[in-house]
Image (cartoon, grey):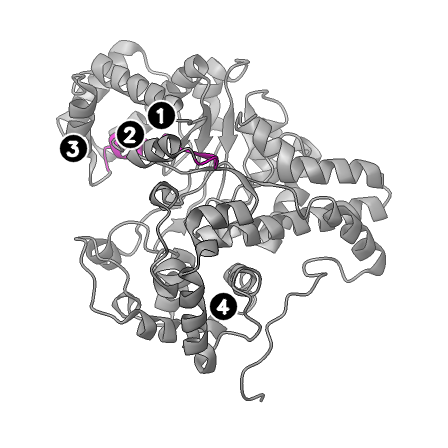
Amino acid sequence: MTTGPQPLALHDDRLFSSDPLQRAIARRLYAQVATLPIVSPHGHTDPAWFAHNAPFANATELLLVPDHYVFRMLYSQGVPLDALGIPRADGSRAEVDPREAWRVFAECFHLFRGTPSSMWLNHVFHEVFGLRVRLDASTADLYFDHINDALRQPGFLPRALFERFRIEVIATTESPLDPLEHHATIRESGWQGRVITAYRPDAVIDPEHEQFPSALQQFGELTGEDVHRWDGYLRAHRQRRAYFADMGATSTDHGHPTAATANLSRAEAARLFDTVVRGNASAAQAELFRAQMLTEMAAMSVDDGLVMQLHPGCFRNHNLGVFERYGRDKGADIPLRTEYVRALKPLLDRFGNEPNFQLILFTLDESNYSRELAPLAGHYPSLLLGPAWWFHDAPEGMWRFREQTLASGGFYNTVGFNDDTRAFLSIPARHDVARRIDCAFLAKLVAEHRMDEDEAAEVAIDLAYRLPRKAYKLG
C-alpha cells in the first residue's frame, strides 16, 4: 500500500480506445472539438451567481453542498447529511464548520473511484484549481485552503469563470413563480455573458406536488388571472411563458413521473381541473391532469415557439425521512420503467407533424433507446432525443446511448450534449467527457470503414456545438 499524497494527473488519452488505430483517430477528431465554445442549453445553475458576481463562499459550499451526486454517495455509506452541512427543508442547517465537512468528504473520496463524479471532480481540481496531488484525508486541508485562496481572486468570480470556460450560453431553470430578477440584473448590468432562463411549471401542474395549492394561489396573484378556473389558468401559463421568452427563454422543461399525455375536450379538461383545484383528485385523476397539461404545453409551444423538454420516469424523493427533513433534490430520486409509444400518442396525434413544434425526449429507462425512443425520433419531425441523462450521464451510458439510437435515429435526431447540472465548475469537465466519448465512438466507425474521417469530424463538431444551438433555437 502506498503512503503519503499521490500525484493527480489527467491522461491525454482518457476515455479513448486502447486500440492504437482507433485511439489515433479519436485524438485527431478530439483536436477539432476540444476548444469549441460550450453551449449549455439545459441546467440548474443559480442565476444569482452571474447577476451579483460575488465570490463563492468556500470549497464546501461550492463543490459539496449543492451536488447531490456527491452527497448521495456519502449518505449511502452512512455519512449523515447534517455532517456535510446540507440545508434542511425549513432553511436551517446543522452548525458544521465547512472545513470539517470538507475533511469528511476527503476521507470518503475513495468511494467515488471509477465514477463520473470522480472524473468531473478531478478535472475541476486539476484544470480549474491547478492541484497536482489527489484528494484524501492527508490532503484535505491543503485542498480546502488552496481552493478558498483561489476563490478570493478576481479570476474565480462567477463571470470570470464563465468566460474562462468558454461558455457561449447557459440556460438556468425557473418556476413560473420566479420573478426572474436575477436575469433582469444580468441584462441591465451590461455584461455580455449570455444567461437565459427556461420555464419549469411542475409546481403549478402537478396536483401531487406538496406545494401545489400554495403555488397555484401565488400563480394567480402574480398573473392577475383567476387560476382556479380552467380558462384563466391557461391564460396565466401563456402570460408567464411570454415573460420568460422576453427574458431570453427558448425552452420549457417538464419533470413528470411518466410520459403520459392526453387529449381531452375543453369541457372534460375543465371538469377535471375543477376536481384538481378542490383537492379531490385521485391518483389516477392527478396523472390524467399531468397528461393533459403536457398536451396543453405543447399547444402553447406551437404558438410561442418555445422548445419543449420532457424528463420523465423518476420516483422523486423516495426516502421519506430525508424528504421530510431536507426537502426535495437530496439524492433520493430513483429511475423508473417508462413507456413512450402509447404514452405520447395523444400529443403526437395533435402536434407530431407541426413544423413549429419541437419536443426533446429524455429517459432514465435505457431499455427504451432502441425499442421506442430512436424509432419515434427517427420518424416524427417534431421529436429529438436528449442525451444520456442523470444516472446514465457517464462514459458507459453515453456509449450505450449512441450504440442503441444510431440505427433508427442517426446522429441528427439527437441534440448533442447538455450538462443538466447545479455544479457550475463541473460544466467543462462534463462537456469534455461527452466530446471524448463521441470522438471515441466516431473513431470506431471510421476504423471499421463505416464512415470517412472527414465525415466523422463534421459529426463531432455538430454534436459538440451546432446541434444544441439548433435544437434549442439559440442561434
Please name the amino acid that badge 2 sits on: Pro
Q: Main secondary structure of the magenta part?
A: loop
* Crowding near the residue tagged with mark 4, few <14, some 14–19, many ≥20 C-alpha atoms within 10 Å: some
Position of residue 192 measured from the top left corner of the image (x, y, whole percent): 48, 35
Q: Quadrant of the C terminus?
A: top right
> Mark 3 or mark 4, which has the lower sequence index?
4
> Mark 2 or mark 3, which has the lower sequence index?
2
The residue that mark 4 highlights is: 112
Q: CA distance from mark 3 to mark 4?
A: 40 Å
The residue that mark 1 highlights is: 244
Q: Residue at x 38, y 37 (%)?
A: 173
> Mark 1 or mark 4, which has the lower sequence index?
4
Q: CA distance from mark 1 to mark 4?
A: 38 Å
The residue that mark 2 highlights is: 176
* Crowding near the residue tagged with mark 3, few <14, some 14–19, many ≥20 C-alpha atoms within 10 Å: some
Position of residue 228 measured from the top left corner of the image (x, y, whole percent): 16, 20
Please name the amino acid that badge 1 sits on: Phe
Please name the amino acid that badge 3 sits on: Pro
Q: CA distance from mark 2 to mark 1?
A: 8 Å
> Mark 4 or mark 2, which has the lower sequence index?
4
Residue 202 painted magenta: yes
Magenta region: which residues?
Answer: 191-208
* Crowding near the residue tagged with mark 1, few <14, some 14–19, many ≥20 C-alpha atoms within 10 Å: many
> Mark 2 or mark 1, which has the lower sequence index?
2
Q: Are marks 2 and 1 in contact (CB under 8 Å)?
A: yes
Q: How many marks?
A: 4
Secondary element at tag 3 = helix
**Whether residue 424 is visible:** yes
Residue 213 image label: 3
Q: Are marks 2 and 3 in contact (CB under 8 Å)?
A: no
Q: Residue at x 12, y 26 (%)?
A: 278
